Amino acid sequence: MALSEFEIKKCEKALEDFLQKRRPPAHLRSEVDLAYRQDGHTIVIYELRQNYRNKAEMIEVDIAKLTFVQTKKVWKIFWMRQDLKWHSYQPYPTARTIEEAVTVVENDEHACFFG
């Protein structure tokens, strides 16, 4: 079962607030920016960067993945390691709300999401 409209709006609000705080200044956004995509119960936060070989092309670099587990009513938090696989964010592997999950990514206490 997909997220309800209410839950989707709640996610959008939390993520838009996060992006407002973390996005680079407007004059740099054509070179580097932050965005997110949602697919079912999963939200991926990613960075958009100019391809260093072709400046007209933008590439996506995944930063964090938040997945809602309906049966447990928790958000699982993942980060992308150098092996390009998602790994559970061990200091805080789950969060009760989307706001709490986004706060974990924003604070990035162990420099896993933003280095």
Image: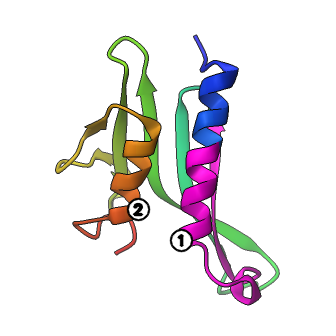
Label 2 and label 1: CA atoms lie apart by: 8 Å
Q: Amino acid at mark 1?
A: Arg
Q: Amino acid at mark 2?
A: Glu
Magenta range is 13-38
Identify whether 34 is placed above or below 89: below
Placement of the C terminus among the 4 image quadrants? bottom left
Instruction: Decide if residue 84 is in sight here.
Output: no
Out of 109 and 80, give the one closest to the viewer: 109
Residue ID for mark 2: 106
Residue name at image x 59 percent, y 57 percent = 17
Mark 2 vs 1: CB contact within 8 A: yes
Q: How many marks?
A: 2
Position in image of residue 100 (x %, y %): 37, 44
Magenta-span inclusion, residue 40: no
Q: Residue furthest right?
A: 56
Out of 41 and 98, give the one closest to the viewer: 98
